[in-house]
Image (cartoon, rainbow, N blue to C red):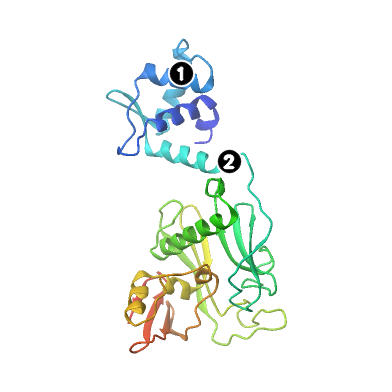
Amino acid sequence: MFQVLSHELRLAVLYVLSDAQEADTFAAKPLAYGELANRVSERLSEDFTRDSGNFNYHLRSLRDAGFVQRVDGGYRIRQAGVRIVRAVSAGNISEEMQFETIPLEEPCPYCGGTSAISLDDDWLFIRCLECPGAFVQDDTLPDGTLAGFEVSPASVQDREPFEIFAVAFQLGLQVHRSFAAGICPECGATTTTETLEICLDHELNAEQVCECCERTTDEFLAVSCDICDRSLMTFPAIVVATDPHVIAVMYERGRNVTNQTWGALASPPDWPSRYVNRDPVVIEYTIPVPDGEDIHVRLDESLTVTVT
């Protein structure tokens, strides 16, 4: 695929055909051969209309690779080509976006200290400036990390730091819900739960790590895509807390959690939990509510959430 796309003329063809897509249409409008050659020539400031053999060769390469198709009326970009254009556009921002660590008004959910945001290598990190954070066991993360959200160059362009922060939270919420549904948010493939556990004997030592589970928090979830290997590290209770059915049941019983902040993805709710089964793993949470009986919710290895 990369070999096919290694020539600037072929990428230009994809961009020109992608530009023929209008917001209110299902598929891009076909471009006749001559019109396509003219637009590519304008884009690259080079006349390909007189070199039909060279242009045909590159066009055929794109067709053979499945990026372009010939239809009545000319040529149209296929979805594989659309994904290439989107990926290049989203990641091809020349100005590197960085900003200094900025304090937040909401305190750290672990120690009550000052929390802050910072941007590093297309990751937006929320960190506590006064405690080790939630992932002391992972020395690849910045000190005090509470949460990390993956962002693209396009998502930070022309936005102020706090706007980026809001975007990152919404994207993070979508990632949680997508993985919980067994769908990779990157490629749409199936997912596998690698780790789903709670530590019933959780006790932190001087290094803020439990000697029993070797983690800072008493629960942990890791899920990854079966195709592209995108992964999510989070807390099982957050999958439960962001489940629409659970949110609705809590709302019905007087607990409104619809106005969530980043803290909803940075630390697990303090709900009593237990293993219903260990192989395969099934965890049950007890959610206290103002009205009526407590809500009992189970989470299994497929990340299916069931209100019992």
Give the quadrant of the C terminus: bottom left
What's under tag 1, amino acid-wise? Phe
Element at label 2: loop
In x, y percent, where is residue 141?
66, 63
Q: Is residue 19 left or right of residue 5?
A: left
Q: Residue furthest bottom?
A: 293
What's under tag 2, amino acid-wise? Ile
Q: CA distance from mark 2 to mark 1?
A: 28 Å
Element at label 1: helix
Q: Residue at x 34, y 20 (%)?
A: 32
- The residue identified by callout 1 is 55
Packing grade of label 1 (10 A; few <14, some 14-19, many >=20) is some
Q: Is residue 235 left or right of residue 30?
A: right
- The residue identified by callout 2 is 93
Q: Camera-side residue: 127 or 297?
A: 127
Question: Closer to the camera: disc 2 or disc 1?
Answer: 2
Q: Is residue 139 left or right of residue 21?
A: right
Instruction: Choose the circle earlier in sequence order: 2 or 1.
Output: 1
In x, y percent, where is residue 271?
47, 83
